[in-house]
Amino acid sequence: SAPFDNDHWVISGKMEKETYQGNDCIRLSEASIYLKDATFLNGIIEFDMTLPKNRCFPGIGFRLQDKENFEEVYLRPHQLGNPDAIQYTPVFNGQAAWQLYYGDGYSTAITYPLNEWVHIKLIIKGTQGEVYVGNTDKPSLVIHHLKREPKPGQISLENNYPALTRFANFRYTKTNEPALQGPFKADVAPKPGTILHWQISNPFDQKQLENSLSIPKELSSQLTWKTLPAENTGIVNVSQITRIGDGSNTVFAKITLTSDSDRIKKFQFGFSDAVKLYLNNRLLY
């Protein structure tokens, strides 16, 4: 166990102690706490929490490399019973990827009482995980593929919204062979025609592309490139290699196509949150 004190945790924001419904606990509001033990890789994490009716996203981070790079599971009490009442997302360079990872293996519908103690248990092994919500024998969420490379790190408890969330009875077990139930699904093979490698540019300000139907030469001369593999689904999580910031909120994703003749081909794509599509330096979309 790890008592909620300065010997075991680094506290960021406002943490208050109290007794609620028979449990000694902490209250977190716009705050996070970070376990000083930075060696959790595989094992079991358990705690109790209370959740309000208000819109909020409290949860747990694990395998933290730093405050901007970790795996995360969070609950959405304002979405009880809906398909995204609980969600898993990887966080790269401060960017959660919930818009890319949704549905089976990432989010699901659950219900639980509000403002009462609910037991939460995570079981993590390699690139797989399970989340149990309430006193259940079967996982509420099965995570088929954790997206970050498995590395030991810290554990965090988080509630970065004003709504009040309580945590109690935190404990964890480090073991490389925790028992998982699954069922886990294998990664799907890429569909024919899926682009599996992209060149990603250094970030720049999107304002440099305004009022132009081509890529400005001044901008082109400033670009550097890194290769980023896509997932078998075709998803490219650009935040893996660059962070967003003021004046650096946009990148190019580039692929070179070779054709022996002029032709029309279908290109299917999705995006978040905005996109401009160029072919041979001409804005098409």
Image (tube, rainbow, N blue to C red):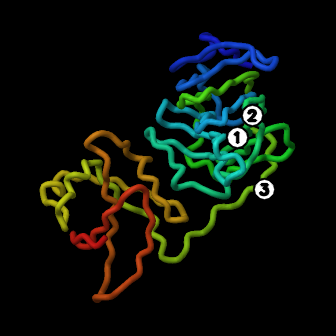
Q: Do the residues labelled 3 and 1 touch (CB within 8 Å)?
A: no
Identity of the amino acid at label 3? Pro
Number of other residues with Cα within 10 Å of mark 2, as a class: few under 14, some 14 to 19, many 20 or more: many
Whole-percent x, y for residue 249 in the image: 31, 47
Whole-percent x, y for residue 18 in the image: 70, 13
Residue highlighted by disc 1: 124
Q: Residue furthest front?
A: 53
Q: Is residue 120 visible?
A: yes
Q: In this view, does 89 lie to the left or right of 139?
A: left
Whole-percent x, y for residue 152 in the image: 60, 33
- Report the Cα–Cα distance between label 3 and label 1: 14 Å
For residue 222, above or below residue 172: below
Number of other residues with Cα within 10 Å of mark 3, as a class: few under 14, some 14 to 19, many 20 or more: few
Q: Is mark 3 on a helix, strand or loop?
A: loop
Q: Is mark 2 on a helix, strand or loop?
A: strand
Number of other residues with Cα within 10 Å of mark 1, as a class: few under 14, some 14 to 19, many 20 or more: many
Closer to us: 2 or 189: 2
| First in residue order: circle 3 vs circle 2 | 2
Q: Can residue 62 be seen in this view?
A: no
Q: Residue at left 54%, top 65%? A: 233
Give the quadrant of the N terminus. top right
Identity of the amino acid at label 2? Ile
Q: Is mark 1 on a helix, strand or loop?
A: strand
Q: Residue at left 25%, top 42%? A: 247
Residue highlighted by disc 3: 183
Q: Are marks 2 and 1 in contact (CB under 8 Å)?
A: yes
| First in residue order: circle 2 vs circle 1 | 2
| First in residue order: circle 3 vs circle 1 | 1
Residue highlighted by disc 2: 44
Identity of the amino acid at label 1? Ile
Residue 112: image quadrant is: top right
Q: Is residue 3 left or right of residue 240?
A: right
